[in-house]
Image: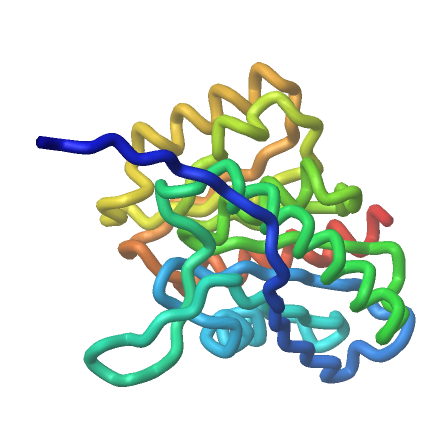
Amino acid sequence: MSRDHEENWLTTITHGRYLIDRASGGEGAPLLVGFHGYGENAEAHLKKLRRIPGVDGWLLCAAGALHPFYNTKTGEVIDSWMTSRGREQAIDDNVTYVSRLVSDVRRRYRPSDTLVWAGFSQGVAMAYRAAARCGFRGSGLIALAGDVPPDVAGDDLPPILLGRGTEDPLYTEDKMAADLETFGRLGVTVEACVFDGGHDWAPEFWRHAGEFLERAKNAS
């Protein structure tokens, strides 16, 4: 005989980890906060952010997702932002985490008021949620290879650099077109960058990201 079960959720304490690269971006430097993709970690994402032209003058922050696991092939510790189980609870946890992260970075490193969010793949949804819901809207948002989540599609967002590789099987042409239509309807300023490549960063996108950061800094 089958038996039903009850599912309950409770709030507990976990710890978030982030990496900082000050480079030439000391006190008073603009702040770039980035979110890695599924199965990556903060170290991998920080390496990508470092390749953006002109970023040496920025304070770089790579946020690590709250759910670590092992890469079974390499033994490396990698991370995920969430799964379909407990999605709403994970979103609340992540937004709270990012809000505390930015507050902590500002207390420790005293950057300028210029703040740009960046996300890759699964981290794109985090960048959108950070801009819309964590209390720090920011001066810009760099989104590569990921779509805008429905829970923030109606929120006020800063100017966006939206990137996609022509051979990306995950962030498809149709998904990008849907995002552009959404942003157009909401009146959000968007710059689209479509480049030759797949689900990854590419030299053309790094160049566009550098130009986008320069405009965000000058506009603040």
Given the current orientation, which residue lies at the most extreme front position? 1
**Colour convention of the picture:** rainbow
| Relative to 107, 210 lies left or right | left
Position of 134 with respect to 144 (left or right) is right
Q: Residue at x 31, y 55 (%)?
A: 199
Name the image quarter holding residue 161: top right
Residue lying at 30% horizontally and 35% vertically, measured from the top left: 5
Residue at 63% across / 72% down in the picture? 18
Query: In the shown orientation, is residue 85 left or right of residue 24?
Result: left
Number of on-image labels: 0
173 sits to left or right of 184: left
User: Residue 151 versus residue 173: which sits nearer the camera?
Assistant: 151
- Report x, y in % for residue 184: 56, 20
Say above or below: 45 vs 191: below
Front residue of 41/95: it is 95
Residue under the point 50% across and 36% down = 88
Coordinates of residue 121 in the picture (x, y in percent): 41, 52
Q: Horizontal and vertical percent for residue 137?
A: 76, 42
For the residue pair 211 and 6, the one nearer the viewer reads as: 6
Residue 215 x, y percent position in the rendering? 74, 51
